[in-house]
Image (cartoon, rainbow, N blue to C red):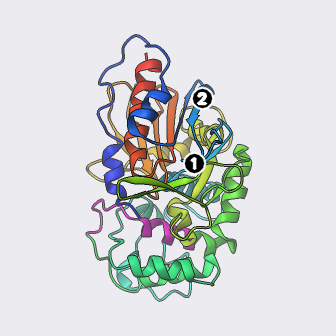
Amino acid sequence: MLDRRALLAAAVAAFPAAARARDAAPDPNAAREAAGVPALGGVWIEGGEVRWLEAVGLRALGADAAVTTADPWHLGSNTKAMTAALFARLVEAGRTDWDAGVVDLLPGVAADPAWAGTRLTELMAHRAGLLDQGLLDVAWLNAARADTRTMVEQRRALAARALATPPAGEVGAFAYGNANYIVVGAALEALTGQPWEALMRREVFGPLGMGSAGFGPPTGEAPLGHAGVFGQLSAMTPETPGADNPQALGPAGTVHASLADYARFLRAFTGWEHGWLSADSIRRLMSPSGADGAYALGWGVVRQGWAAGPVLAHEGSNTRWHALALVDPAGGRALATVSNGGPRGGPACQTLAGEMIRAFAA
């Protein structure tokens, strides 16, 4: 797993500080070649529609098959905003509420009394004091990959471990961690009696028409993720051990989707009339908490000169893939860039995002 706090910091990279006249269309091949990644893609959404979509390069180093604009890409931690949106859907359906407590939604879990007042929204904002340290270590990663229990059982077991002792971190302080979203996933599974994967298909992928969306590395005719080995990239088939994080980590970061389908999700935060979530729910999902105002529910919140207001930002990576999303809600536009270039994917995605902003954010 990657330290995704670094990804959040990278999402605030030095993109153009001010809007200017639109430049020529971005050149993803130049960005791909400069970073040395197999493939790179991007999508620009404005006015509720895809205005630019392109993918270039190879599905795998050493192979001949080129990527297409219909190919799916692993989105990593950008899954978190989808899990938060799933929670909002359940609130709107009357299954729970915005102040729901994690202990209340996990009956039968022996939680330390210190968690009694903790809300799910505090976990989704990474302010509940729950830390990955001691929970999502190498031992857990190895054990989870070999675990034969259902995903529901594995996530509930992780939630039980996390809640068995008081918060290790400072409650109210921002501390990014994947365990927060695994616990949220376990709570939603306990609430509904359904696996998180089934809930995502029913409440997110289905209503938004995200037909390409799934979980884990894409399979079949699709790009492969790449590992960095002694400075070189090596393609990893989906069934290769280590090709992805354990499936139990799903609510924190295992969704894959095509760029066009990911755009369907992103445009819901651009003011587009979608009917999928209410304006109040979207506002709550985008509203940061804490004095620093740096993180909402599944989204980092930053200021960038090209945007009409605060920008929703997130990067995701399982170290084999990379995804970057930026949303300018006030300006009604958003972008995403993706790569299968392993550790080189971050710089490639950031370079292409900067070119897209220069080209389209007049």
Q: Secondary structure at mark 2?
A: strand
Query: Which quarter of the image is occupied by the C terminus?
Result: top left
The spot of residue 210 in percent (x, y) is 70, 46
Left or right of 19, for residue 185: right
Q: Which residue is mark 1?
A: 60
Q: Which residue type carries mark 2? A: Leu
In the image shown, does 111 or 104 lie closer to the viewer?
A: 111
Left or right of 154, for residue 9: left
The spot of residue 151 in percent (x, y) is 62, 76
The spot of residue 28 in percent (x, y) is 49, 29
Residue 65 higher or lower than 160, as above or below: above
For the question of whether residue 209 can be seen, the reply is yes
Residue 76 higher or lower than 337, as above or below: below
Magenta highlight on residue 123: no
**Identity of the residue drawn at 40% across and 53% down:** 232
Q: Which residue is mark 2?
A: 53
Q: Residue furthest front?
A: 62
Mark 1 Cα within 10 Å, few/some/many (few <14, many 20+)? many
| Magenta span of residues | 170-186
Q: CA distance from mark 1 to mark 2?
A: 20 Å
Specify which label sits upstream in the sequence, 1 or 2.
2
In the image shown, does 326 or 102 lie closer to the viewer?
A: 326
Mark 2 Cα within 10 Å, few/some/many (few <14, many 20+)? some
